[in-house]
Amino acid sequence: MPPNHIPRSCLPQTKDLYSRSGIDIQGAIQIAPGMLPIGAILGVTQKLELFGTRCRYTSEEDMCGIVDQLYSKQVILYDDSAKTAYLCRLINLIVSLVRAYLRDNGYEYDTKLLNFETGVEHNQANIRRVVTEQTDLCRAFKELTKRYAKINAVLRQRNTKSVIFGFEAVDILKGHDFYARKLSVTNGVEAWNALAELTDVVFCGGYGDVILSSDRAQCSVKPPHGCNVLICPLALLREHFDDVDGKCFKQRGRQSFVWTWTGRPFECRMLKGGRGCDGRECWVDHLQCINRPCRMMKKVLKNQHNMQSVSLDNADGAIGFGKLRTGSRSKNDAKSSGSGSVQVN
């Protein structure tokens, strides 16, 4: 039997730590002309130094350890062409970079070695075996993994209330001199900015098709183009939210990181009502928001009835975080966003 799952504690998260670094002693004497000293002042000040407690990702030396780390770590991939972001495992990005690295540098290898019908995420043991047996693959995996870790260690802060910092995928691939890029926290990005605090963000100008529809999909599973929606598989969200109370999801010990599920998942109200769906209108009601303001949260919950319960154990489901506005809806409805999800393979 495998060991039981190791949960987080409920102790509060500490971002900064003050440590005593010394003492300053100051003295002063107050005097007047022609008179003896009439006052003395002695001051003792304790000096404190501020330390950050954030631990950054560093790659392993052993090849099997590297692969296992890549499967455990997540990354947000932002497609600037489609204005859409995807939460995925780091192994997905590294495998794509390895393929590009081998292609661009003229390596000859069997391309089928990194093609998996059931997806990269379900072939951890196979990837460990392949990279340890193939010298060129092993070298490329080590080089790109260490390069990725070293580059992202430069960022002391991944995000603020106004911007998200990250690096271009092509810059990581090439390894030349470059600067970080920034994404403004506007136009829907604010709905998932909190997730980027402890998750690396990698930018690209186009990543191709990421989402595949399933037989259970009722309408368009792809988010509207240009709306900064973040698509998150439920299985990956489960690793961020381990404290569940009804429809309220939190992370143990972490403050200001709350997601309250709203609406009815996996349903299109357009098709349910006998109307046609344009692939966008239903998304207005489907999108989620992390750390939604309390006044807006109360309004959303008040206007929604018979909300369907949700489980993060659905391995084939995914949820979109963001905000949409459409001209076809009334002014009041256009300002609100609800909840929903899509199916992915």
Image (cartoon, helix red, strand yellow):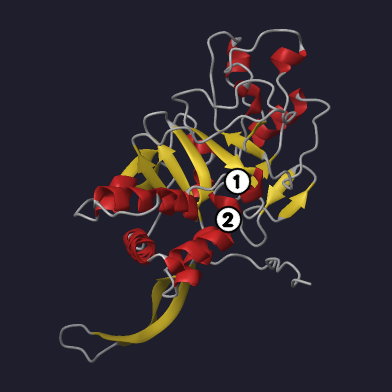
Specify the amino acid type for callout 2.
Asn
Check the picture and name the quadrant holding the C terminus. top right
Q: Which mark is residue 123?
A: 2
* Image-based side of 283 in relation to 51, left or right: right
Q: Which residue is rendered at x = 57% and y = 8% of the image?
A: 328
Task: Give percent across and percent down for residue 72.
Answer: 55, 61
Sequence-wise, which precedes: disc 2 or disc 1? 1
Residue 232, located in which quarter of the rendered image? top right
* Image-based side of 248 in relation to 277, left or right: right
Q: Which residue is mark 1?
A: 118
Q: Which mark is residue 251?
A: none
Residue 344 in view: yes
Q: Which residue is rendered at x = 34% and y = 61% of the image?
A: 140
Toward the left, the furthest residue is: 34
Task: Give percent across and percent down for residue 319.
Answer: 63, 36
**Along the line of sight, the residue nearer the viewer: 15 or 86:** 86
